[in-house]
Amino acid sequence: MDSLITAAARALAAGDPLGALNRVALRDDAPALALRGIAMAQLGDLARARVLVRRAARAFGTREAVARARCVVAEAEIALASRELGWPAKTLDAARATLEAHGDSLNAAHARYLELRRLLLIGRVDDAQRMLATLDPTPWPPATRATHELVAAGIALRRLQTQPARAALQRAAQAARAARIPALAAEVDSAAALLSTPAARLILRGEARLMLLDDVEALYASPTLVIDACRLSVRDAHATVSLARRPVLFTLARVLAEAWPADVPRDVLVARAFRLKLADESHRARLRVEIGRLRTLLRALTNVRATPDGFVLTPRIARDVAVLAPPAEDPHAPLLALLADGQPWSSSALALALGASQRTIQRALDTLDTARKVQSYGRGRARRWMTPPVPGFATALLLPMPLPND
């Protein structure tokens, strides 16, 4: 490897893409193409970066298996930055195996962390945690250690484990300072900000207040029945029942919780759950059926008791009943939570992360675009969506998580 390639590689490792381009911008040999692609990715031109990395992989040829595998890993990282979450995981796994077989343990570890970050983005937190437990970051350079700790913090934040998340972020900050890469330090700072910004609203006995993630964690452990509008579930300190696939039942539970300890008239429940202004006897009959289903699902947590005018929640163990709502109510809050990371997302990646159809996501994006809450660029398959973070609010509670019954 010649001196210019070596100098460009060192510049990229230090987070200086312009310095790298100054050395290899006019070269078209395979190593220079690969370095130019990585530099363009660091500068944010992901489309150009992908083209250069693919050209480099072809230029290396079949005899240079390690170099080709490194190009595959680089392309996977570009795909992750582009939020193309459907990128073939088997291709990345094959490249990782090639790198391990040839003794390139550092780039093999980098490939594993790319897969970890992808799993976290699509809500497969259990799989990510199992994979992370097999990795030891101690031998790796500071930048890789920082990535390890960021993934650990992301898992802890999804699980509402604020103390482990805070410890992981502190270790990530130390590693980022040692790496001296400004973009990495900024990513750590952005993740740490989630711990000090409001994450939800607590509605208890008719009063509402904002809560930090630490407060939410304490609420989950308290003797309170929580109707969680962020994760569409009902929970106390001992059990959780997901109603994510039962929107009518969750609406009934939330309306009853907001009124607790008072009851809710039947006409109000019909209007809120079925979105009707006037109720007839058929709607009241349907309400009785849905209340019966809700009573069956929540029998371990609370009873739904009939009163002369309507229904009321009667917790079996909990002392209070509270509603945990997003800090700002929006029917597309989970979608906005994903977009709030500031990265460009494709509609297919959003659909994969949220477990919805691509057409549903496209309709939601069109609605948000009309309301000027999101913006897009590109056309067709190259179209990407993004939005700046919601000012002053954390979104960890709205990100994809496995359902309690999965």
Image: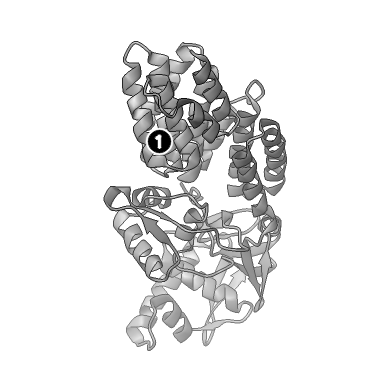
| Viewer-side residue, 301 vs 67 | 67
Q: Which residue is mark 1?
A: 49
Q: Residues within 10 Å of mark 1 (few under 14, many from 20)?
A: many
Q: Secondary structure at mark 1?
A: helix
Q: Is residue 373 left or right of residue 195?
A: left
**Type of amino acid under label 1:** Ala
Looking at the image, residue 296 lies above or below residue 261: above
| Viewer-side residue, 164 vs 302 | 164
The count of marks equals 1
Horizontal and vertical percent position of residue 42: 50, 38
Outermost left residue: 380
| Viewer-side residue, 324 vs 339 | 339
Residue drawn at point x = 47 percent, y = 43 percent: 44
User: Does any portion of residue 156 appear in the rendered image?
Assistant: no
| Viewer-side residue, 30 vs 297 | 30
Residue drawn at point x = 27 percent, y = 51 percent: 380
